[in-house]
Image (cartoon, rainbow, N blue to C red):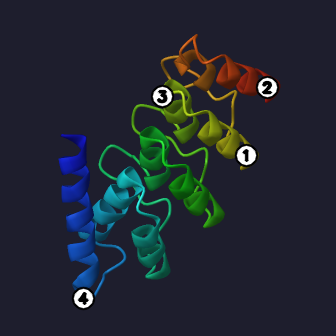
Amino acid sequence: MTHVVGRIHKEAVCGFLEAAPLDARSADSLAVLLRAALIGDTAALTVLLDRGVSTDARDAAGRTPLMEAAFAGHIEAVALLLARGADPNATDSAGWTALMEAASKGRTEIVKTLLDYGADPTYRNAGGWSARRATPRSQVEILHCLKQAGG
């Protein structure tokens, strides 16, 4: 099922990119950027960013492309977005960050990359959750990284 969903996302992204012209501020551009981040399509991300879509564009829930890529475990997409200026400390409407997403899913390399780009390991949302609290206890390496970073 995941393969089918990924193919549908990829087809939607490709179809949008083939259409012209692109309004970088449109809801469609944002939706495609978020979808490209979710499936880890770095080529599509590059095209969209080159066309002026913001790395920190947000959907109605405040989710950014970086949060989607971190959640889904796409290190290349995370690295691209960070290199292009994505805010590693942006929060969604629930107060979650990309670091919290990556830590909660056990994405060690993404956690390290986010920390390297200045993600705040001490941040707590209104519910008191931090990246460390979101990390499963079995993820010892992530817990260690967060502790070393001050979280």
Q: Which kind of residue does numbered mark 1 sit on?
A: Gly
Query: Dot 3 corresponds to which residue?
Result: 105
Q: Which kind of residue does numbered mark 3 sit on?
A: Lys
Query: Dot 1 corresponds to which residue?
Result: 118
User: How far is mark 2 from mark 4, CA to CA?
Assistant: 47 Å
Query: Dot 2 corresponds to which residue?
Result: 150
Q: Quadrant of residue 94?
A: top left
Q: Earlier in the sequence, mark 4 or mark 1?
A: 4
- Left or right: 23, with 77 as reference point: left
User: How far is mark 3 from mark 1, CA to CA?
Assistant: 20 Å
Q: Could you say whether the residue bearing mark 3 is in a helix, strand or loop?
A: loop
Q: Which kind of residue does numbered mark 2 sit on?
A: Gly
Q: Which kind of residue does numbered mark 4 sit on?
A: Ala
Question: How far across and how far down the image is residue 70, in percent?
Answer: 50, 43
Q: In the rendered view, would you say 7 is above or below 71?
A: below
Label annotation for residue 20: 4
Mark nearest the camera among 2 and 3 is 3
User: How far is mark 4 from mark 3, CA to CA?
Assistant: 37 Å
Q: Local crowd at mark 3 within 10 Å, few (<14), some, or many (≥20)?
A: some
- Whether the residues at callouts 2 and 4 have beta carbons within 8 Å, the answer is no
Q: Nearer the viewer, residue 107 or 150?
A: 107
Q: Earlier in the sequence, mark 2 or mark 4?
A: 4
Q: Earlier in the sequence, mark 2 or mark 3?
A: 3
Q: Nearer the viewer, residue 118 or 14?
A: 14
Q: Could you say whether the residue bearing mark 1 is in a helix, strand or loop?
A: loop
User: How far is mark 2 from mark 3, CA to CA?
Assistant: 20 Å
Q: Earlier in the sequence, mark 4 or mark 3?
A: 4
State whether residue 21 appears in this view: yes
